Image (cartoon, helix red, strand yellow):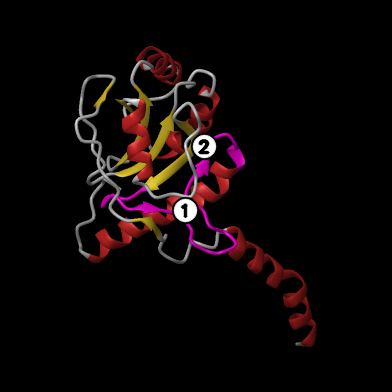
Amino acid sequence: MKKNIVLFVLFILPIVAYLFFASGINSFTKLPIITPKIPDFGEWKSLNGEKVSLNNKITILGFSGTEILKNRGNYFNLNEKIYQRYHDFKDLQFVVVAPLGTEKDVKAVVEALGAFTDVSQWHFVFASPEEIKSYFSQLKLKGTLNPDFGTADVYIVDKERNLRGRKEKKGYKEGYSTFHPAELSNEMLDDFKVILYEYRAALKKNHNATKQL
């Protein structure tokens, strides 16, 4: 009996502990709200001249800036690590705010992504630099935009337009760097799964489960 206990402590317990921590600190809680009810896009239009809204969609929100071609690798990282795994969900969209005048560069990036990905859930909306700065300031984040009106970070926004993240003192996180694939594969993927779990649990509780999530 004692031998079995020793074997359990030495071999089984460490594995259980590893699986627990590897699953992520947020896996068993709701993802906190960083900024409630962020503004919608109003009259801003996409490449196709269509309006895009944050309402009733889980949104991965980004800001491309004027140097989108230079930073296009960031979008390929996000596409590979997150988008390709989840873009079939009808309630999910990837929205990037881009400065007016960058339409040609944005189109080139979308076409490059489209060579190996269904880009139907990628949306780029356009606004003036002044509008972008004003909109970003309303997100009330600690991070800032770069001088080109963009950032490598992307943000998780829920269906009620709440920007979500982590509020722990030692692990505060409001955005996820697309420049670092490991951050997308770990922190962002973990937090994104929490959001999906929240909605799936709510649908199940209300007996309204659909194929949307």
Which contiguous range is marked in magenta? 157-182
Which of 143/27 is in front? 143
What quarter of the picture does the N terminus occupy?
bottom right
Q: Is residue 121 above or below residue 112?
A: below
Using the image, tell me which numbered label, if any, was put on residue 41.
none
Q: Give residue 177's position: percent from left, percent from top.
A: 54, 40
- Which residue is disc 2 drawn over? 81
Q: How much space separates mark 1 and mark 2, taking CA atoms?
A: 13 Å
Looking at the rendered structure, the kind of residue marked 1 is: Asp
- Which residue is disc 1 drawn over? 191
Which of 28/60 is in front? 60
Looking at the rendered structure, the kind of residue marked 2 is: Lys
At x 60% / y 62%, what residue is drawn?
Answer: 170
Residue count near mark 1 (Cα–Cα under 10 Å), binned few <14, some 14–19, many ≥20 = many
Q: Give residue 162's position: percent from left, percent from top.
A: 32, 53
Q: Is residue 33 above or below residue 89?
A: below
Decide whether residue 175 is among the magenta residues: yes
Decide whether residue 155 is among the magenta residues: no
What secondary structure prevails in the magenta region? loop
Residue count near mark 2 (Cα–Cα under 10 Å), binned few <14, some 14–19, many ≥20 = many
Q: Secondary structure at mark 1?
A: helix
At x 35% / y 59%, what residue is drawn?
Answer: 198
Q: Secondary structure at mark 2?
A: helix
Q: Is residue 88 visible?
A: no
Whether residue 136 sits left or right of residue 142 in the image: it is left
Q: Give residue 103's position: percent from left, percent from top.
A: 35, 16
Q: Give residue 25's position: percent from left, percent from top.
A: 54, 63
Mark positioned earlier in the residue sequence (1 or 2): 2
Q: Is residue 36 visible?
A: yes
- The mark lying in front, picked from 1 and 2, is 1
Q: Is residue 106 above or below residue 84?
A: above
At x 32% / y 50%, what residue is drawn?
Answer: 158
